[in-house]
Image (cartoon, rainbow, N blue to C red):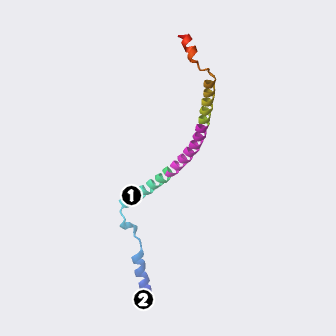
Amino acid sequence: MSSKNVAKLLNLLTEIHLNHYSGKMISDFNQLSEKIGQLAEMAHALRRENAALRVSAVTLTAENADLQQRIEEAHQRVMALLERIPVPDADDEEEAA
């Protein structure tokens, strides 16, 4: 067999004939391609949402720390006021009765 014939034979073996594929299979490939595109867009949207949620979480964590500090300060003020209230003696309780 000549090298020309071998080359022709190899070309025949490696050729892709699209007419072997059914229209249904090509349609399935197109649908799959569209779904992959939708999935990629959804993944991008979720990444954007995740980034926004991370920023929100940082903001809320800082706000929570501020509120906890304010509660602690209020607690300390209430405790200081309670310490200033005089405790009645046993004699004072008997007189009140």
Viewer-nearest residue: 96 or 45: 96
**Image marks 1 and 2: residues in contact by CB distance under 8 Å:** no
Q: Residues within 10 Å of mark 2 (few under 14, many from 20)?
A: few
Viewer-nearest residue: 41 or 47: 47
Point out the tag, 1 or 2, that comes first from the N-terminus: 2
The residue that mark 2 highlights is 2
- Report x, y in % for residue 34: 45, 54
Residue 53 sits in quarter: top right
Label 1, label 2: how many angstroms apart (C-alpha)? Answer: 42 Å
Q: Residue furthest front?
A: 91
Residue at image location 61% in from the left, 40% down from the top: 62
Residue 87 sits in quarter: top right
In the image, residue 14 sits, relative to residue 92, either above or below, namely below
Residue at image location 57% in from the left, 15% down from the top: 91
Question: Is 36 placed left or right of 78 in the picture?
Answer: left
Q: Quadrant of the N terminus?
A: bottom left
Q: Secondary structure at mark 2?
A: loop
Q: Residue furthest bottom?
A: 1
Q: Which residues are magenta?
A: 43-65
Residue 66 sits in quarter: top right
- Report x, y in % for residue 54: 56, 46
Kind of residue sitting beneath label 2? Ser
Badge number at residue 28: 1
Kind of residue sitting beneath label 1? Asp
24 in magenta = no
